[in-house]
């Protein structure tokens, strides 16, 4: 096994009423000390506010690179939530890896738990409200600094300081960064989409790329980015 990253922080939190009428969110996650149990739907003590688009088996754990924080602190100086991990609602703050360095289908060992990289994050309007920046979700998407999700292959325990060990990389040509850029660039090239549809995509991305392939045009992002 090759060590590819390290867990800086493990974070979780409950869902609460959020900024707009009827909305709920668990984006305000807090660091956990000591071993944390991992089950098929994520970390013990963690929740999601809207299970239609968050959580579930394919979005059990959200990862975000700590290295991105330097960029965001430059762009948004004096933003309190950027002083520590958790600003983006991540469960695992990682050192040593970003979207370029992980691929769809990668299998990882962290502590006694095993995971698979399932998809990149498509940011939503809740980031706009969290940061007080009307186009924050768009900025995160356009920058490619969006993070990614894991599905749980083997429950277990993990904690801050654990190594992220790569067990297998079946699709080395398909980094999370490449797939997120394809979405952002609104690419509808049939041959490219055929190659993407051959990957082990979660249902939401299967629908997204198949619709592009069939319709020859990209999806409307208004509801996701603006609410």
Image (cartoon, rainbow, N blue to C red):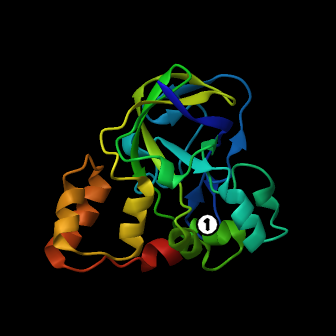
Using the image as rendered, state which of residue 73 and residue 224 is in the foreground: 73
- Residue 79 place in picture, x, y as percent: 80, 66
Using the image as rendered, state which of residue 135 and residue 27 is in the foreground: 135
- Residue 55 place in picture, x, y as percent: 45, 47
Establish if 50 lies above or below 214: above
To which quarter of the image does residue 117 belong?
top left
Q: Residue at x 24, y 58 (%)?
A: 196
Horizontal side of residue 39 vs 14, given as left or right: left
Q: Residue furthest right?
A: 78
Tag 1 secondary structure: helix
Using the image as rendered, state which of residue 32 and residue 16 is in the foreground: 32
To which quarter of the image does residue 23 belong?
bottom right
Q: Is residue 54 visible?
A: yes
Horizontal side of residue 47 vs 85, given as left or right: left
Disc 1 target residue:
127
Horizontal side of residue 93 vs 192, given as left or right: right
Establish if 144 lies above or below 200: below
How many discs mark residues in the rendered view? 1
Q: Residue at x 74, y 28 (%)?
A: 33
Crowding at dot 1, Cα within 10 Å, few <14 / some 14-19 / many 20+, comes out as many
- Residue 59 place in picture, x, y as percent: 43, 46
Establish if 123 lies above or below 66: below
To which quarter of the image does residue 135 belong?
bottom right
Q: Residue at x 45, y 59 (%)?
A: 177
Establish if 5 lies above or below 213: above
Q: Is residue 227 visible?
A: no
């Amino acid at each position: 096994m090759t060590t590819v990253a390290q867990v800086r922080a493990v974070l979780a939190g409950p869902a609460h009423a959020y900024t707009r009428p009827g909305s709920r969110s668990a984006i305000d996650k807090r660091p956990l000390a000591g071993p944390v149990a991992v089950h098929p739907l994520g970390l013990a003590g963690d929740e999601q506010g809207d299970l239609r688009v968050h959580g579930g088996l394919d979005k059990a754990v959200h990862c975000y690179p700590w290295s991105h924080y330097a960029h965001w602190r430059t762009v948004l100086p004096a933003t309190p939530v950027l002083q520590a991990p958790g600003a983006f609602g991540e469960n695992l703050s990682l050192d040593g890896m970003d979207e370029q360095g992980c691929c769809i289908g990668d299998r990882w060992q962290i502590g006694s738990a095993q995971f698979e990289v399932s998809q990149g994050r498509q940011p939503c309007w809740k980031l706009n409200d969290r940061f007080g920046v009307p186009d924050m979700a768009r900025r995160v998407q356009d920058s490619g600094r969006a993070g990614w999700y894991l599905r749980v292959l083997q429950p277990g325990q993990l904690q801050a300081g654990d190594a992220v060990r790569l067990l297998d990389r079946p699709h080395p040509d398909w980094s999370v960064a490449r797939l997120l850029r394809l979405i952002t660039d609104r690419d509808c090239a049939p041959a490219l989409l055929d190659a993407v549809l051959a990957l082990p995509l979660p249902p939401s991305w299967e629908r997204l790329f198949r619709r592009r392939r069939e319709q020859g045009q990209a999806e409307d992002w208004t509801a996701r980015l603006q609410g």
